[in-house]
Image (tube, coloured by chain):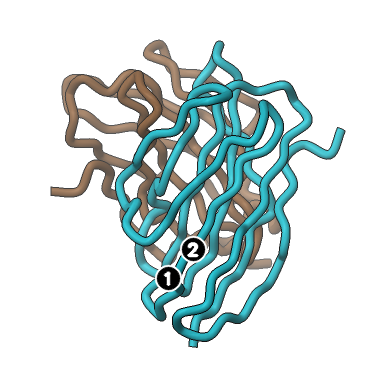
């Protein structure tokens, strides 16, 4: 099992460009999450999906949209990237039975 | 007030030492607690869940003090491979997880 995978690993965007970060898990987990991690700050929740077909805002949703394409895949879209969105983005998933999350390897995004 | 607070360190300890980290949380209704380990430029990985009765996994012991709203992690007989950042995570029984900023540990030969 690959666990949680993310693409791309690295990305550089210019201000105003758009892109989609992809996440997939093969653990048959119901819940999936998108976080960002910035220096000096803990991981902050952007959006989550408790189950296929549902999505909800987290702590810092502004500037992002998400799609839960199916049970395996949860994508994060930046419609018009801003330098403040320079960060490391992690996707995570968990079963419905425990609160233990499993993380993907992350996407390092730089917006110039 | 932050949901979760940790001493960022850094903690620099010699091999074989015992080191302890604390983490405080602000919401008394919090229900699930975890310690994650994060190596440099890698993803967080679950180290252990923290149960009310306390739990131990080899050299690692986690404790929960609900009255004072803190959790702790004790590492005994530190190894070089324990060098990492340790993240405290709290969940309020929904899908909102709150992460501390992490405590940096370096184990010195």
Q: Which chain is cyan?
A: A
Discs 1/2, front: 2
B43, A1: nearer the viewer: A1
What is the display colour for chain B?
brown
Q: Quadrant of residue A107?
A: bottom right
In the displayed structure, A58 sits above or below A32; it is below
Q: Position of residue B82 (x, y in %)?
A: 64, 52
The residue at 54%/22% (across/down) is: A51
The residue at 45%/51% (across/down) is: A65
Q: Quadrant of residue B29?
A: top left
The numbered mark at residue A78 is 2
B79, A30: nearer the viewer: A30
- Chain containing the residue with disc 1: A
The answer to whether residue A31 is left or right of residue B73 is right
In the displayed structure, A101 sits above or below A96; it is below
Residue indicated by mark 1: A85
The residue at 59%/26% (across/down) is: A94
The numbered mark at residue A59 is none
- Chain containing the residue with disc 2: A
Q: Are marks 1 and 2 in contact (CB under 8 Å)?
A: yes
């Amino acid at each position: 099992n690959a666990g949680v995978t993310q693409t791309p690993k690295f990305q550089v965007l210019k201000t105003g460009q758009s892109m989609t970060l992809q996440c997939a898990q093969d653990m048959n987990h119901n819940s999936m999450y998108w976080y960002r991690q910035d220096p000096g700050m803990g991981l902050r929740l952007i959006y989550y999906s408790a189950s296929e077909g549902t999505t909800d805002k987290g702590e810092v949703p502004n500037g992002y949209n998400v799609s839960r394409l199916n049970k395996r895949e949860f994508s994060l879209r930046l419609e018009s990237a801003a330098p403040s969105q320079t960060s490391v983005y992690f996707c995570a998933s968990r079963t419905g039975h425990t609160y233990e999350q499993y993380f993907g390897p992350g996407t390092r995004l730089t917006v110039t | 007030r932050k949901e979760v607070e940790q001493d960022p360190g850094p903690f620099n300890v010699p091999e074989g030492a015992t080191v302890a980290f604390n983490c405080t949380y602000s919401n008394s209704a919090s229900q699930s607690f975890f310690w994650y380990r994060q190596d440099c430029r890698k993803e967080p990985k679950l180290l252990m869940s923290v149960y009310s009765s306390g739990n131990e996994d080899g050299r690692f012991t986690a404790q929960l003090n609900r009255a004072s709203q803190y959790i702790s992690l004790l590492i005994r007989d530190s190894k070089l491979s324990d060098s990492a950042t340790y993240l405290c995570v709290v969940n309020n029984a929904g899908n909102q997880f709150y992460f501390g900023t992490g405590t940096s540990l370096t184990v010195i030969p």
